Amino acid sequence: MVAASALRVMIVDDDDGMRKLMRRTLERMGFSQIYTAKDGSEGLQLARTQKPDVIVSDYDMPNMHGLQFLKAVREDPALAKTAFVMLSGVANDRVIEKAGELGANSIIAKPFLAADLKHRLEALVHELSGSRIEWELPKQA
């Protein structure tokens, strides 16, 4: 078992509101090591320094969109095995197919439920490490 609080998660999305919502959602699940970036370029720099266990990235972003970011992550030997979840509001088979070809571990269509994200993260961690996530109840104030 691995505690959710022990996993490093990075959110990459150009929408400030979505980054905040994702952070709150992940915090409620028990994650505490959460990093955020506003596009793929910033995300790639941050990933190289923080070495996240999981990256949750939007597809449609300026500067470096999600597919370019995913490709750069997979081409970096230090990041190549990082779990990668692609979020997309574009229900386009070509985008989904390309993300799969580039090595996305999971693709989630927006909008999505927090429970769906939680189950995907749990499945990914188990698939990639053989461990299960130990979900911690958020602390009450």
Image (cartoon, grey):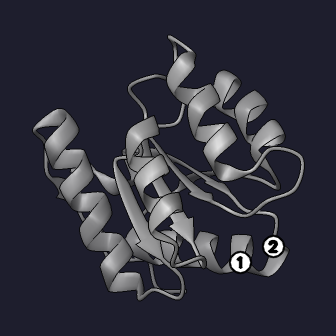
Residue type at mark 2 is Asp
Where's residue 48, x and y in %?
67, 23
Secondary structure beneath label 2: loop
Mark number, residue 128 = none
**Amino acid on which the number 1 mark rests in the picture:** Met
Residue 113, given in percent of the width and then of the height, sits at 41, 88
Q: Which residue is mark 1?
A: 18
Horizontal and vertical percent for residue 51?
Answer: 56, 27
Front residue of this view, candidates 94 and 71: 94
Q: Is residue 1 visible?
A: no
Using residue 49 as the reference point, say whether residue 31 is left or right of it: left
Q: Are marks 2 and 1 in contact (CB under 8 Å)?
A: yes
Front residue (pair 80, 101)? 101
**Quadrant placement of the C terminus:** bottom right
> What's the CA distance linking mark 2 and mark 1?
5 Å
x 57%, y 39%: residue: 70
Q: Badge 2 local density, few (<14 within 10 Å), some, or many (20+)?
A: some
* Residue at image mark 2: 15
Q: Residues within 10 Å of mark 1 (few under 14, many from 20)?
A: some
